[in-house]
């Protein structure tokens, strides 16, 4: 499958900097036993960025190659036979899953494609004999899609969307439709949307405040990476009422989910709230930035309006920013955001 540059892979994974949703998990073999319309929803045809996907009957062996799509399946009470790891959680109770997803995982062991190995090859995926490949949050490209879809239906990102920037609601509803669980998917979307509405209403001071989500660049330049509009990390904060700081919003990121800001441009990172996401370890990142005179000179940093986010807990949940991780992230981070704004 497509591989990003080292920076993109590390920032998407290690800087994940993104309570389980109700119901007990089931295996893919039991999918449709709860929620949605089950077998009556099939066949179904779904348009995607590369063509269209027709799923003739309820999938029984699902392989997930989208980085965060496993959470959505688990939230819909469906357990894949294998999934792509997005970040390595060293203390994970369930290998490959964040702490917010553990309760939804069930007891059946799932194969994990380690993030350190990069995306799985076409051959690795097909060797598992799937009857559906879910690739909504992947970087799959046309040639890989064509190779896979010649053998098995492939649920790729929606038409007119950008790799790694599929909206949370669109991703959830697309996957729900493919699994014959549209009603359940809509309920999950409505629940998360309401959770954001409630959190924003309880914190009216968030509205209109500017935010930037950043971390030290990994290319040795001494600069910084900042996430753009539409990225999961930025979307989490804008859903709470924040606005992306103009210094970053005005930069052209092309089709990427982040921009690189040089040390000379560091003042572009100034915002009412600077969110610094740990790369591998939050304490290490905090120490690195504290020792950085350029970062320390940013007005927001000088005023103490910085939120340091652990990549393996809140940072991971924000990076996933899906229907399973959002409740966990809100519970954990809203009090920390309040404190950071207060300085």
Image: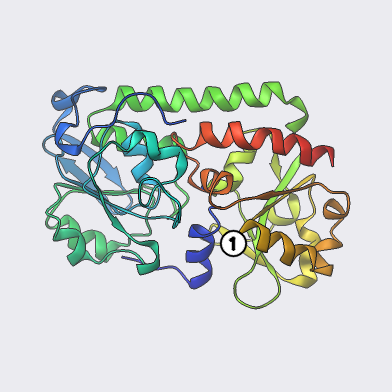
Pinpoint residue 105: horizontal percent, then vertical percent. Answer: 32, 38
Q: Quadrant of the N terminus?
A: bottom left
Q: Is residue 74 left or right of residue 26?
A: right
Residue in view at x 13 percent, y 33 percent:
43
Residue in view at x 35 percent, y 61 percent:
114
Residue 212, compared with residue 333, is above or below; it is below
Q: Is residue 210 left or right of residue 233?
A: right
Residue 108, compared with residue 258, is above or below; it is above
* Residue closest to the eye, 308 or 35: 308
Residue in view at x 47 percent, y 30 percent:
19
Pinpoint residue 99: horizontal percent, then vertical percent. Answer: 46, 42
**Label 1 SS:** loop
Pinpoint residue 171: horizontal percent, then vertical percent. Answer: 39, 40
Q: Is residue 8 left or right of residue 107?
A: right
Residue in view at x 26 percent, y 35 percent:
78
Q: Can you see residue 171? A: no
* Residue closest to the eye, 136 or 116: 116
Q: To which residue does mark 1 refer?
A: 279
- Where, by quadrant of the figure, is residue 202 drawn? top right
All told, the count of numbered labels is 1
Pinpoint residue 89: horizontal percent, then vertical percent. Answer: 45, 54
Question: What is the residue that sits farthest to the bottom in this orientation?
Answer: 220
């Amino acid at each position: 499958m497509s591989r990003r540059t080292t920076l993109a892979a590390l920032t998407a994974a290690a800087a994940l900097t993104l309570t389980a949703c109700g119901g007990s998990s089931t295996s893919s073999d039991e999918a449709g036993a709860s929620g949605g319309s089950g077998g009556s929803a099939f066949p179904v045809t779904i348009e995607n960025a590369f063509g269209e996907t027709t799923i003739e009957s309820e999938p029984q062996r699902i392989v997930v190659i989208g980085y965060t799509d496993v959470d959505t399946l688990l939230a819909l009470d469906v357990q894949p036979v294998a999934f792509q790891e997005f970040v390595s959680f060293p203390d994970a109770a369930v290998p490959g899953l964040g702490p917010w997803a553990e309760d939804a995982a069930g007891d059946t062991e799932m194969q994990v494609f380690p993030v350190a190995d990069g995306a799985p090859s076409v051959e690795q995926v097909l060797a598992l004999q799937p009857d559906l490949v879910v690739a909504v949050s992947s970087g799959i490209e046309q040639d890989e899609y064509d190779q896979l879809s010649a053998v098995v239906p492939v649920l790729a990102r929606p038409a007119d969307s950008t790799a790694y920037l599929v909206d949370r609601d669109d991703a959830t509803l697309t996957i729900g439709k493919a699994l014959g669980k549209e009603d359940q998917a809509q309920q999950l979307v409505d629940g998360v949307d309401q959770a954001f509405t409630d959190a924003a209403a309880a914190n009216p001071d968030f509205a209109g405040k500017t935010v930037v989500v950043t971390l030290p660049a990994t290319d040795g330049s001494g600069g910084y990476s900042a996430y753009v509009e539409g990225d999961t990390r930025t979307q989490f904060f804008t859903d709470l009422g924040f606005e992306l700081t103009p210094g970053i919003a005005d930069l052209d990121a092309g089709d990427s989910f982040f921009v690189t800001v040089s040390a000379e441009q560091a003042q572009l990172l100034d915002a009412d709230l600077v969110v610094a996401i740990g790369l591998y370890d939050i304490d290490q990142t905090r120490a690195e930035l504290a020792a950085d005179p350029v970062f320390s000179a940013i007005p927001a940093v000088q005023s103490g309006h910085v939120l340091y986010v652990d990549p393996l807990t809140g940072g991971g949940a924000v990076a996933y920013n899906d229907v399973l991780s959002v409740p966990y992230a809100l519970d954990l981070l809203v009090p920390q955001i309040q404190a950071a704004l207060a300085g």
